[in-house]
Amino acid sequence: MATACVETTDPDQFNKIVEPVVGLVKTRKKHIGRFSARIETGCMSRIGVMVQKVRNICVRYETPELHTLVIVPLSGVFEVNDGYRSSAFDKHSAKVTCAVEPFTFRAEAATVMAVRIDNALLRDVSARLTGCGDGHPPSSELNLHTKAGRSFCLQANMVWSHMHTDTIGETQAAAAEQVELATYFLFATNSPSAASLDGHGSASNHPALAIQRVEDWIMSNLSEPICRADLCDVSGLHVRTLTREFTEKYKVGPMQYVRQQRLDAIRRILLTTDESENTVTRIAQDYCMFHLGRFAHEYRLRYHELPGATLAR
């Protein structure tokens, strides 16, 4: 994670600061008035956010195709010209570009937030929600007065605040926040990926995303005791909904899924460790498999051999 804060009247310095977040830019002073900018930037692995207060600015953006850029007006008005038409944006809507074509950004006096989202992240989230990789929004504008638009802005502010908090870093929590932001973006831009979110009120409450959160949490806690109540707390789903979603996706309930993941983790260790350095009992108990008879039975059903035979290879 990286952050920067600069006040400048030099367009070249402005370009240098914002390029890591939003991509290639070329700034020039407007003929009337003095150019000035206060820029704060922050970057995570798959999200970049920039807040800039600018006067008399004209910027040409040439963002790489790997990114989608959202420019949200916090105050004032900015104008965007994509070579075909010129559009003004205020606090009611935000400009979205999939960075296929360069565009020019102009403002006399405005404060804006620019959010750069990696297209690979959008495709990943889209695939989780719908099973397809459509990560590009069909719309060039994001309505900030819809519930999804407001949620996107709130999530962007949360990510922004955590970028400036030393304690979060590139943690699992930070990764989850980036996924949440991409989900709200797809929802707010009426992407086909968002159609499956209808009826769930909030993107974070969508069962597909909730199950993904549970899966990630389980993989990070395989060596710790896990119960259904833990999984319900992580997902925000009722136990019946949680069980139904796991059964539809994996043909087993959530606790059986946990045991399968533990068996897989144990097998990976058995295949890569020496029997003189470790034992089946110790490895199994490290993953909360304390009933060794039941463990050996389940292991044999799953892998068609006893755990001791795997270790002895």
Image (tube, helix red, strand yellow):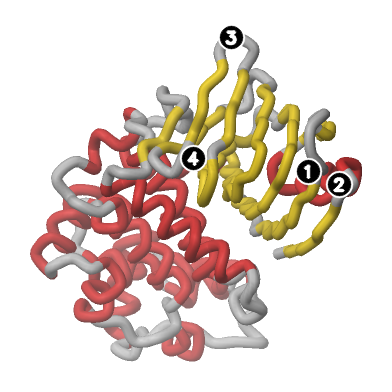
Residue designated by label 4: 122
Tell me the crowding category of disc 1: few under 14, some 14 to 19, or many 20 or more residues within 10 angstroms, Cα based: some
> What residue did someone put label 3 on?
84
- Cα separation, mark 4 vs mark 2, equals 26 Å
Q: Looking at the image, can residue 304 be seen? A: no
Image: 211 above or below 62: below
Mark found first going from the N terminus, 4 or 2? 2
Q: Are marks 1 and 2 in contact (CB under 8 Å)?
A: yes
Circle on res. 16 = 2
Judged from the image, the secondary structure of the residue bearing numbered disc 4 is helix
Quadrant of the frame with the C terminus: bottom right
Label 1, on which residue?
A: 19
In front: mark 4 or mark 2? 2
Q: Are there few (<14), some (14-19), or many (20+) residues within 10 Å of tag 4?
A: many
Q: Are marks 1 and 4 in contact (CB under 8 Å)?
A: no
Q: Amino acid at mark 4?
A: Leu
* Image spot of residue 236 (x, y percent): 23, 68
Distance Cα–Cα, label 4 vs label 3:
27 Å
In the rendered image, residue 11, in percent from the top left (x then y), is placed at 87, 42
